[in-house]
Amino acid sequence: MIKEVSLKGHPLFFYILLFPFAKAGFSVFAMQFLCWISSAAAVYLLHAYSPFPFLLNFLITVSAPFLYFFPVIARSYSIIPFLLFLSACFYSSRREKPLLYLMPLAAAANTHFIMTGFAFILFMFFYHENFIKEKAYSGKAARSIIEVIALSIAVPAAQIIFAVMNNDFFSPSYKGAFLPITYFFVSFFENLTPYFANNEYVLPLSILSLCGGAAVILLLCFILHKLYAISAKLFYAAMFSLAYQLAAYSFFYPLVYPMRVFCFHCILLFCFWCGLQGVKEDKAKAISALNWNQKSSLSLLKLLFFITIPSGLYFAFGDCMHKFSSAPEMAAFINNNVSESDYVFASTDFMESLVLALGERKILFSRGEPLSFSRNEYILKDTDLYNYATPGRKVFLLLWEKEETQRYNLIYSAESALKWKEDYYLVQIYPETEHGY
């Protein structure tokens, strides 16, 4: 597990949670339940302990991240809101209960690399407050705190370095750095439109989308300005996290998925939650006493989450009415109609759901090696497939782009799926009629 996870750069915490269920033979439902229960627990903390008014809490609850993306398909992202909200509950008492504040942040740092930067800057602030400015801890307590901070940053950092060195997909590239940044901001705007569901989860960069992206940048500027007025330290934490994410997208991992965008929403919630800690028991009375910056920040947060609602409803209804993935359908066709002696190749190694759906039946990749969840070397070429087409044995190729099927003999097309890269097409290879790429 450590080798497989490290190769893709994902920290271990989420997979350690799933490890006993996988070894006990549980299905993927165990992961789905963990995603749902984590999101439900985050919503509970939000309503029970946050300083936000009911309307804002309600809009957050029915927003796209909490209605659909975190509880349904988020994987390790799904536990991030719960961990951040749990840590926020102890922010005001972080000196008296340091581990209760730091441990959830340490776990968040070990869920995904986009959270490591945020945890790091909060750890540094905590260390400066309690170890540099004031000698708040000594002896065993100090060692325990420092160990938590060091390990929670060192482990994911080592995994990312290992992944970059051993997985070509993560090779640093300084080309086209502007595009992922543009996609990140446009992703906030496109929550207003069904284009959020297109192939790359990004709206085509048109005048409309760029204007929308500019409007969202303006909204974020207002929100961050209000955060600075409430707490400069939390403002710097949010800005550092944003810069860290944009740098990661630009130089290491250029795919900007909805869950990653929504993680920044959760970071903003954490920062405002901690900055408004004084609003406690009597929320209505306390909120009425807030100053202009605090009240207006709540209104801006309401707008930020309100604009995500159409996207959440679109995906939720789409998931109920259509297939999220066509992997089970394609797996059933292959198992029932393709002989075990025939070869079935994958055109890309982004077919984990199909590998899972096929069970014991293997998909081949590259030089005829079974497709695995990581460390798939080489790129498949048509010429590689010709060597396997022999009399009495057929060669099939799995594709996820419909346009590619025009060059082949299409055997089976599964029903279109809601999720990008989950449409599957099976074609047959005839060396005497096909040509290389």
Image (cartoon, grey):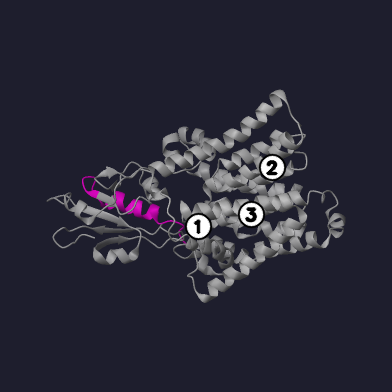
Relative side of 304 to 388, left or right: right
Residue receiving disc 3: 239
Q: CA distance from mark 3 to mark 2?
A: 14 Å
Q: Position of residue 308 (x, y in %)?
A: 61, 63
Q: Using the image, determine if residue 404 lies above or below residue 10.
A: below
Residue at the bottom extreme? 207
Q: CA distance from mark 3 to mark 1?
A: 18 Å
At x 57%, y 57%, the residue is 261
- Magenta range: 322-343
Q: CA distance from mark 1 to mark 2?
A: 28 Å
**How many neighbours does mark 3 have within 10 angstroms: few (below 14), some (14-19), or many (20 or more)?**
some
**How many neighbours does mark 2 have within 10 angstroms: few (below 14), some (14-19), or many (20 or more)?**
some
Res. 217 mark: none
Res. 256 mark: 1
Mark nearer the N terminus (3 vs 2): 2
* Secondary element at tag 3: helix
Q: Amino acid at mark 2?
A: Phe
Relative side of 432 to 50, left or right: left
Which picture quadrant has residue 94?
top right
- Given residues 406 and 334, the one toward you in this image is 406
Residue at the front extreme? 132
